[in-house]
Amino acid sequence: MIEIKNVSKSYKEGINVINNLNLTINNGEIFGFLGPNGAGKTTTIKMMTGILEITEGDILIDNNSITKSPIEAKKRLGIVQDNPEIFLKLKGIEYLNFIADVYEISKEDRINKIKELTERFELGDVLDNKIQSYSHGMRQKLLIISVLLHSPDNWILDEPMTGLDPKASFELKKMMREYANQNKTVFFSTHILDIAERLCDRIGIINKGNLLFVGTYEEMKKELKENKSLEELFMEITKNE
């Protein structure tokens, strides 16, 4: 479970880019976090993962404060970003073993997990090649595999489909549902609204640092009294902001 409590973020005194954000992402659900460019999605994710300091409030990862107990909180999450900035001079297998060492994964467990995940993402044949030779999509696959090695209870994905081929995108969406079915938390930020409409159990819409809506797609249609696509409803909710 991820709990965002009264969180604000400012870069200049008196100017918030996130305004008193309160949000709970429950175990066993895929939560879609939506918003226009510059709405505050990536800033929120960077605070959730401890990359950015929180100006006010706190974020709990399975009851562990990202500000007061950052190591314990980070052990319980994994993040997939849209830009796979990883160590290009390493071979793929060297990078995966490095991540496994960080999370103290046993030799037997890492061998089994690497085999399982590389087969699902069809990356096994290039693990002995340096990452700098990989395409963007292959690097994204490697990043996803590395994040899942320690089976985090909370999986945070920021535009994870970027660069993935259709087969890999399909596999990733299937894994997200598998994770939620294991009573784990999946937090999914995306601009692809038709995927969010089909995949997410609940949706949050943020714009200019303010949370405008939280609920299911069906609840959104009832609230706006319109039977439209998520894309059309999203445009209505954000148009006056």
Image (tube, rainbow, N blue to C red):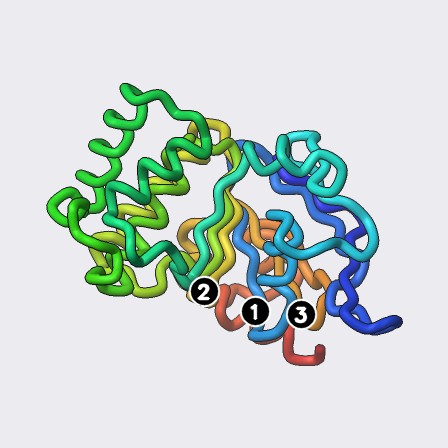
- Residue 82 location in percent, x, y? 42, 61
Q: Which residue is mark 2?
A: 193
Where residue 238 sits, quadrant-wise, is bottom right
Q: Which residue is mark 1?
A: 234
Amino acid carrying label 1: it is: Phe
Residue at 72% of width from left, 46% of height from top?
A: 4
Disc 1 residue crowd, few under 14, some 14–19, many 20+, Cα 10 Å: some
Amino acid carrying label 3: it is: Asn
Residue at 57% of width from left, 53% of height from top?
A: 203
From the viewer's perspective, tell me whether residue 30 is left or right of residue 109. right
- Residue 171 location in percent, x, y? 27, 46
Give yes or no for contact between labels 1 and 2 (Cβ–Cβ under 8 Å).
Answer: yes
Q: Residue furthest bottom?
A: 240
SS assignment at label 3: strand
Q: Which residue is mark 3?
A: 207
- Viewer-nearest of discs 3 and 2: 3
Q: Relative to 68, is 198 above or below?
A: below
- Residue 53 location in percent, x, y? 72, 54
Quarter of the figure that contains the N terminus? top right
